[in-house]
Image (cartoon, rainbow, N blue to C red):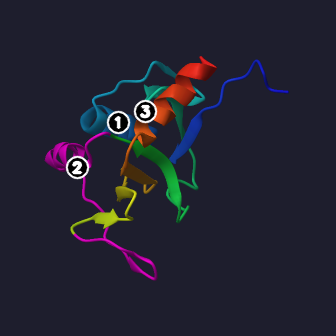
């Protein structure tokens, strides 16, 4: 089942033009496809469809996760592009300067222009390489 299929991340935008500009300004990406269905970006080995919806930004959970080999480097670059990281003080999860240290992983969250929550994390050990190998094995 689904042997011949492609998965993609899907993010809602209340203003598609603003979202496309955000992806260009923050991630340095332009859509690989842009039509009445929305704008599709290729990001981290997967397609990400950004489409217009009145329900954009209503989810209170992570909508897109990014794994990186250097969280500090990438947070600094994102901050230089105007990204503001969220701070949390929840049972079992507290951030300091936007970063949570979970022992085997460090991570942070930020909202895109449409209110979608995006995480960026640096897994410990070979976590990033294992994720890349998983994607490559399916290609």
Question: Which label's residue is closer to the chain start, 3 or 1?
Answer: 1
Q: Element type at marker 2? A: helix
Q: Quadrant of residue 36?
A: top right
Name the residue nearer the viewer: 20 or 122.
122
Name the residue nearer the viewer: 13 or 122.
122
Question: Are discs 3 and 1 less than 8 Å apart at CB?
Answer: no
Residues at marks 3 and 1, CA–CA distance in whole angstroms = 25 Å
Please tell me whether mark 3 or mark 2 is closer to you in this view: 3
- Callout 3 crowding tier (Cα within 10 Å): few <14, some 14–19, many ≥20: some
Q: Residue at x 73, y 22 (%)?
A: 5
Q: How far across and down, in percent of the image, does residue 103 sit?
A: 37, 63
Q: Residue at x 67, y 24 (%)?
A: 6
Q: Element type at marker 3? A: helix
Q: How far across and down, in percent of the image, does residue 92 sit?
A: 45, 78
Q: Is residue 35 left or right of residue 109?
A: right
State the extent of the magenta-drawn residues as a range: 69-96
Report the residue marked by disc 3. 129
Residues at marks 2 and 1, CA–CA distance in whole angstroms = 16 Å
Report the residue marked by disc 2. 75
Q: How far across and down, in percent of the image, does residue 101 sit?
A: 33, 65
């Amino acid at each position: 089942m689904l042997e011949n299929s492609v998965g993609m991340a899907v993010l809602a935008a209340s203003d598609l033009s603003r979202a496309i500009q955000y992806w260009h300004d923050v991630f340095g990406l332009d859509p690989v496809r842009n039509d009445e269905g929305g704008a599709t970006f290729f990001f981290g080995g997967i397609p990400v469809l950004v489409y217009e919806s009145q329900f954009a930004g209503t989810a209170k959970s992570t909508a897109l996760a990014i794994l990186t080999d250097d969280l500090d480097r990438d947070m600094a670059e994102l901050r230089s592009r105007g990204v503001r990281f969220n701070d949390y003080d929840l049972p079992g999860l507290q951030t300091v300067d936007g970063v949570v240290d979970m022992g085997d992983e460090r991570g942070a969250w930020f909202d895109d222009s449409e209110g979608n929550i995006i995480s960026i994390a640096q897994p410990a050990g070979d976590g990033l390489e294992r994720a890349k190998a998983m994607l490559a094995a399916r290609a």
